[in-house]
Amino acid sequence: MARAGARHILVDSEAKCEELKSQIEAGSDFADVAKEHSTCPSGSNGGDLGEFGPGQMVKEFDEVVFSGELGTVHGPVKTQFGYHLLEITSRTE
């Protein structure tokens, strides 16, 4: 069974998501940005979601986490919760 680890930042607008992605790509630390801006309770842990299997997160998450490049910031990813930046930290097949 495939497993993945990821962290994310949840915000309420695509524009805010793009702005934070630019900050991270310019050198800001993902965890620091998550702590400061994420509206998800995981923000206090730097956005860390731990490890999970397919189907444990919303479909839009699964599509990115189980196919995207590791160590890259993906997004904005829109879900019913808002807009996410995702970073895949690990994945096993």
Image (tube, rainbow, N blue to C red):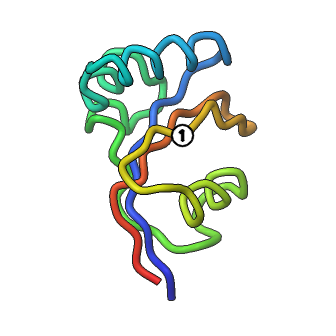
Residue 2 placement (x, y as % from top left): 50, 81
Q: Specify whether 45 is left or right of 87.
A: left
Residue 79 falls in which quadrant of the image? top right
Where is 68 relative to 21, above or below? below
Q: Disc count in the image?
A: 1
Where is 86 relative to 92, above or below? above
Where is 83 relative to 8, above or below? above
Q: What kind of residue is marked 1?
A: His
Where is 33 relative to 78, above or below? above
How crowded pointer 1 is (Cα within 10 Å; few <14, some 14-19, many 20+) is rated as some
User: Which residue lies under the disc numbered 1?
Assistant: 74
Residue at screen point 49% across, 42% down: 86
Q: Dot 1: what SS?
A: strand
Residue 52 falls in which quadrant of the image? bottom left
Residue 33 placement (x, y as % from top left): 32, 21
Residue 55 falls in which quadrant of the image? bottom right
Residue at screen point 63% across, 61% down: 62
Residue at screen point 59% across, 64% down: 67
Residue 66 placement (x, y as % from top left): 56, 66
Furthest toward the bottom, the residue is 1
Residue at screen point 51% across, 74% down: 53
